[in-house]
Image (cartoon, rainbow, N blue to C red):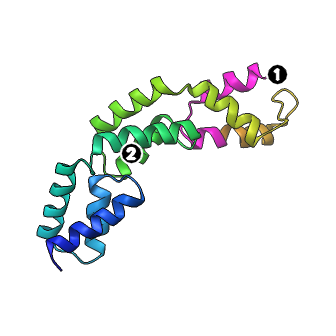
Amino acid sequence: MTADSALAAAFRLLALRDRSEHDLAGRLRRKGFGADDIGTALERCKALGYLDDNRFARQRAKSLLASGRAAGPRLLAELKQQGIAEDLARIAISEAGHAVDPDQILNDLLRKRFAGFNYAEADDRQRRRVIQYFMRRGFSLSRVLSLLKEER
C-alpha cells in the first residue's frame, strides 16, 4: 500500500461525510495503511481543506444539539470521543449554544417523544422515565424540571 492509495481511501471516506483527523486516521489504520502513509494522506487532506477539526467540531456540536441527541457534558464527551481536543470542543459547544436554543430543543423533544405527557398528572415512574430520558442526553435537571413544570 502506498501514500497515494491512502490518500484515495481518505478522499472516499471524506466524500461520505466530514470526519475528525483522529477518526480518519483510525479508519485508514484499520484498512491496513502504515503510519507514514496515513500521515502523508492526512497532511494532504488538511492542505486541501478537506480535513478540518475546527469545522468538524462546530458542525458536529450543532448537529447533536439541534437534534437533541446530546447537550452539556454529554455533548462534550461525544466530541472528545471523536478525537476532538477538549478546548476545541468547548469552543464548538459554545458556538453551537448560540446558534441553537436548548429550551426550544427540549420543548420539541417533549412534544415529539412524549406527546400528551402531563407532569402534574403523571405518576412517579412516568416522571422519572421522562426526566431520565432528557438527562441521558446531557440536559441539566433544573432545565428539564423547569420545562416540565411550566408545561402544566
Percent coordinates x, y for residue 78 in the rendering: 43, 47
Task: Judge whether residue 84 is colored magenta.
Answer: no
Say which residue appears at 26% left-offset and 54% top-offset. 21
Overall secondary structure of the magenta stretch?
A: helix
Mark 2 sits on what residue?
A: 79
Asked if 70 appears above or below 16 in the picture, the reply is: above
Percent coordinates x, y for residue 109 in the rendering: 68, 37
Q: Provide the residue span drawn in magenta.
A: 133-152
Camera-nearest label, 2 or 1: 2
Left-right relation of 127 to 1: right
Task: Judge whether residue 134 is colored magenta.
Answer: yes
Q: Are marks 2 and 1 in contact (CB under 8 Å)?
A: no
Say which residue appears at 26% left-offset and 69% top-offset. 8
Say which residue appears at 25% left-offset and 78% top-offset. 32
Mark 1 sits on what residue?
A: 152
Percent coordinates x, y for residue 62 in the rendering: 47, 36
Corner quadrant of residue 95: top left
Asked if 109 appears above or below 8 in the picture, the reply is: above
